[in-house]
Amino acid sequence: MARRIRRSTGPLDRRANAILRAVIDEYVSSAIPVGSLALVERYGLGVSSATVRNILAELELSGLLTHPHTSAGRIPTDEGYRWYVESIIDSALMPEVEQLMIRHQFGQIEYANEHWFRLAASTIASVTRAAGIATPAKPSATQVRRVDLVEINDRLASLVVVLREGTIKQVLINIEVGTTQESLTEVAAALNSIVDGRTAAEISRAIARFGSTSPLADVVRRVADRIVVLLREYDTASVEEVFSDGLLNVMGAPEFAHSDKLRRVFSALENRAYLGELVEAVAASGDVQVFIGHENVPDDMREVALVLAPYGQPGRAVGVVGVLGPTRMAYPQAIGTVRFVSGLMNELVDHLYA
Amino acid sequence: MARRIRRSTGPLDRRANAILRAVIDEYVSSAIPVGSLALVERYGLGVSSATVRNILAELELSGLLTHPHTSAGRIPTDEGYRWYVESIIDSALMPEVEQLMIRHQFGQIEYANEHWFRLAASTIASVTRAAGIATPAKPSATQVRRVDLVEINDRLASLVVVLREGTIKQVLINIEVGTTQESLTEVAAALNSIVDGRTAAEISRAIARFGSTSPLADVVRRVADRIVVLLREYDTASVEEVFSDGLLNVMGAPEFAHSDKLRRVFSALENRAYLGELVEAVAASGDVQVFIGHENVPDDMREVALVLAPYGQPGRAVGVVGVLGPTRMAYPQAIGTVRFVSGLMNELVDHLYA
DNA sequence: GTTAGCACTCTGGCATGGAGAGTGCTAACC
DNA sequence: GGTTAGCACTCTCCATGCCAGAGTGCTAAC
């Protein structure tokens, strides 16, 4: 689980507030440490640079800003970003023009449910200019909707399992030479009367009671077992797949100019265990969550931030969409985008369960 | 298409031969330009460094080696690698232990045909310590094996199309409120009598002749149209998907220490158009092909080499497996691995068409 | 044809020094 | 008391120069 660091200071006065915000905005857009002079020049603060310096020193004392070295400007700490994120997380919205554009894109693949989460990641990547990530909506206890057996050749058949939400699992199975498509269809029919609407555990139980004496009963039993295995594998995988797009955007950020740091980001992305944890935490929370720098447990992720939101139907099927970028990220935009896209995904999933 | 540069020199004498080979072996393993002294010390050449220097100068003259700067050792040119590859391409084999290991891995997913190509890429990546790439075997003119319609809710159904080789396409379709699973099954049955074993074009023609007056005829026609669209989309995509694994391995290479070059490699991988061309060229050739540095047309790929091999059944369904790495790659190993894995994939696909 | 010897060249690492940016402190100001 | 001007101080960055090391290419001798 990600640990959340609590800042130790009390509330900031209005001016310190504005200055911290200005430092973050400036640093996010320029990637250069921000000096007191630059602040008074570019943000109409109405005070001198000396005053700003005093406040910057205070902010540094409370751990919200830091110094790369004595004679450099200030940069935000992870705690500084955390404070900033808390202050905008509820109000961050997407511009309506972009909302329309995205809606249009999703409209085009409305019927390709297998691709929804991929489009979500791609869209988020292109809007935020960071990496977009998404997982498919995973049912909590998979229910089978229908089974089909199709002969491929005289030794192989394709076992197709349609799940409650319309998604599909498929594997090959061996058949005895000479088995006809007719008998396969018969087996499938027998199976359908057993599996419809059921979970792995339920099918398992039903098969134990299955006392048919028909010559195909053995085959039915064998295939049912295979289905149970298939469902179990699917149910136990914490995250089925994490799709990401726009990694090139992250590669462009100056903080990752040396490929060593970049390497760590990538190996972090391959860390399915941690992502699985986050996905579960986010799904449970029900709203956008932000994980900044060292708030992430794995060392590899201490230089990146994640903005994640769940989608789907709690208790039935949930997935996650989000952004991965440098801690120096445009949080308002990232949060707004992720929230909007997760809302859109909600609508799509709702249709499946309507 | 990739252009192949022909080296201008005639055959090399045995000694020049051995030295060029030594330079390449040394440079591939160390990534440091190779000097004449290092060569006589590490490879028992039986001559002095001065003699080696003369030969190195000759090799440089014929364009097989080059110099980063006056006082540095030699590094191979793309032409040098090309010469080397030609000399070993027919004899490169995998160690038998590794062959067994890989066979074992594939045995475990023998029935998960949708995952074969992914495992191929992952295996190649881990064996060669470079990036593995693979595409699924794509049929040349997709034939439908069977169609199924499954009710998801009172407005949506899942249209499942099983193709000849057992792979699956699926989309959602709208249905009229009140449509029962029984009538969907009826529609599916009607469709199956039309589509079995047919391609998009054939289905299109059959539907034009379809003169049924049953109340479901309209629905049958609509769904058939949807199937045709689905197949057409699939048939016209030059490469359906390019799966890659082990990109982290490439990131570790010293030539990509600065993320700028790395960035180009990644954007090259996203260049589906070029990869599509290569896949077609490789599939047509029927054997392992190597594309080194500037033999690749896109500028982004001038610092990488590709080792690709086709698999599947020519004229029916072909895919490609391969390695992407720096031009400074262990070619014998890469070629041996790719050839072996493509052979294994052949066996798997053959079973589908047995 | 091969080799020893040597002058030459270029890189990489390291120290030096000045310009620039930004801080932190002090003392004066309102 | 908070704010500000002034200034010394610190540190980075960049250019410069220098030296050691590696490796070459050439020449002359074997």
Image (cartoon, coloured by chain):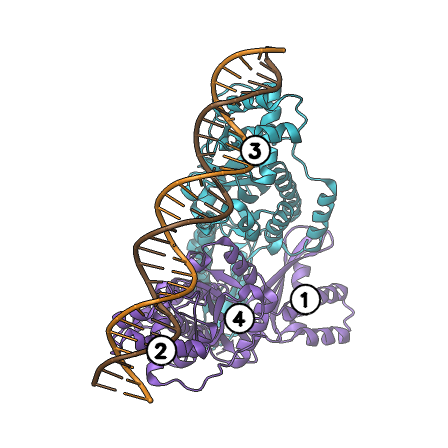
Chain colours: A purple, B cyan, C brown, D orange
Kindly state the secondary structure of the residue where label 3 is placed. loop
Residue marked by disc 3: B34
Residue marked by disc 2: A54
Residue marked by disc 1: A227
Give residue A289's position: percent from left, percent from top.
48, 76
Q: Is residue C29 left or right of residue A81?
A: left
Q: Amino acid at mark 1?
A: Ile
Kindly state the secondary structure of the residue where label 1 is placed. helix
Task: State the CA–CA distance, disc 4 to disc 2.
Answer: 27 Å
Q: Are marks 1 and 3 in contact (CB under 8 Å)?
A: no
Residue B269 appears in view: no
Give residue A2's position: percent from left, percent from top.
56, 74
| Whether labels 4 and 2 share one chain | yes
Mark 4, chain letter?
A
Q: Amino acid at mark 2?
A: Asn
Residue marked by disc 4: A294
CA neighbours of label 3 inside 10 A, class few (<14), some (14 to 19), many (20+): many
Relative depth, front residue between B165 and B63:
B63
Q: Quadrant of the N terminus of chain A?
A: bottom right
